Amino acid sequence: MTGLSPSIQQKSGIGSWMIALVAVVLSAILGLTMMRGGEYWPLYAALGAVAFVVILVRPEMTTLLILFVLYSNMAVIAKNNGVPEPIATGVFGVLALPLFQYVVVRRQRIIVNPMFVLMILYLGVLYVSAAASARASESEDRIFSYVVEGLVLYFLIINTLRTRELLRKAVWVLIFSGVVMGTLSLYQEITGDYDNDFGGWAQVKESEINVSGEDFFGQRESRPRLAGPIGSKNRYAQIMVVLLPLAVSQIVANRSLLVRAYSALACIPIVGGALLTFSRGAGIAIGVILLVFMLLRVFKLRTIALVALVVYITVIVFVPDYLYRITTVTSVASLLEGDEENADGAVLGRATVNLAAIEIFLSNPVLGVGPGQTAHYVRQIGNQFGLRLLASDRRAHNMYLEELADTGVVGFSVFMSIVGLTMWRLWRLSRAWKNVDSTVYYTLIGIFIAIIGYLVTAVFLHLSYVRYYWLLLAFAAAAIHVYSTVSSEQEEGTPALESAARNVATSRI
């Protein structure tokens, strides 16, 4: 597969590959909607046949299809609709096909980067921490999940996203997945048809939130929260927030007005889907993302103002109740001041579990209590603080605190070094490309800020649905490899690429 020159890449917009993907996805949604309550085997058999043909004709398309399946949670939806679990949950194993083509047929080397080495080291730490714990068997699920949805997935992604053109298309596949999920959420909100979950693509949770205080009769108004194809409100918000920097970066990364317009419009369903979950963490993360764009001076002020305007209009038109929801963040200040009566109940609950996680870590600072075992101790320790009574075992609603409690300083240090090294290399590489190719520069910065967005949401959420975290880091690692490598795929004699090669080679990435 040959690479494209920058001029060709800038002219290429949404090609036939995207049209085919759109057709497959829309057919799936339409079929699931029309066949509600029935068996879905005919539909999935047809989609499987189409996918198989695509894989045979265009092996590089396999990676793009699997990326969409993973990010849209299509595999889990398929399992819930009758597809056998081994087929549904093992779908990313299909990535072994393009890997086979690269390594065996084309005789390209297997890619192993420093971050992957650290991931292997982290696996060793997990085993040691589990062995030193009081309930070693309780760590099996956590370790197995990390191996399958962390190590294996990461390895497959970095070894199949090998070319610049494929990486460019992968960015658009992720953005498109956000557009599909967000559009369905906006449809539910606009029509009020919350009973239609489109076969699992647009789920609505039974839990409701207070949106505007008490009415004249003292009753508190409430409304449903949308959970997309994930089925978890906060997780759905998290994976949508991550897509916003990718979409925003493409507004200025392309010369085509049509592609810029699509990128800007894509922000609407992405932001709308995130905010319709009524996740306060998502709102804070979006604010941080826009702030980072501004601080890095990546875009002109008018671009930031445009994105902020799009976000504001989206909130006013589609989710005006979110304005009230975000104001409840001030209850954190009440808690810090010792005014527990005026603090939000959810804030009290999270403060309780987080304080418990800190206490667990302080009692086991080196290796923690064992991977995935913090939840066993949170209720007992948390109830001693007297903030909010925990009636069942709960995980710490903070990725960092839970990691400290689970694996101690040793595990936390290795865990954070993986994302830290990834971001450092992304940053150095983006600086090398800044004055060489703006398209590459903006793409790298978009991925960099996407990771920041995830890390911000992780302040309010523990690490579950781990494949999204490792997929994001793998995507970043693939970008680092692709844009750090100068090979025969690039056109010879292209001044911009030769200059980039020199800059990358001389920078210590």
Image (tube, rainbow, N blue to C red):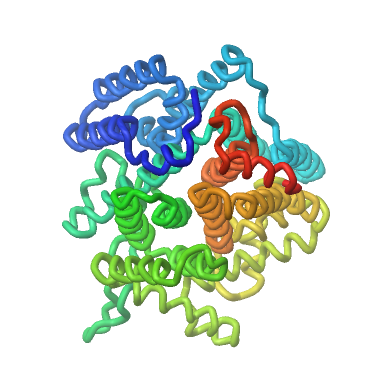
Q: Residue furthest top?
A: 105
Image side of residue 426 versus residue 164, left or right: right
Residue visible at 54% across and 16% down in the picture: 101
Residue 460: name its quadrant.
Answer: bottom right
Q: Nearer the viewer, residue 74 or 196?
A: 74
Q: 312 above or below 228?
A: below
Report x, y in % for residue 83.
Answer: 36, 25
Q: 319 above or below 226?
A: below
Total numbered labels = 0
Q: Nearer the viewer, residue 121 or 77?
A: 121
Residue visible at 42% across and 52% down in the picture: 250
Residue visible at 51% across and 18% down in the picture: 97
Q: Nearer the viewer, residue 3 or 246?
A: 3
Residue visible at 68% across and 49% down in the picture: 425
Residue 39: name its quadrant.
Answer: top left
Report x, y in % for residue 56.
Answer: 40, 14
Q: Is residue 433 visible?
A: yes
Q: 234 above or below 494?
A: below
Image side of residue 64 versus residue 265, left or right: right
Q: Is residue 369 visible?
A: no
Report x, y in % for residue 78.
Answer: 35, 31
Report x, y in % for residue 472.
Answer: 54, 45
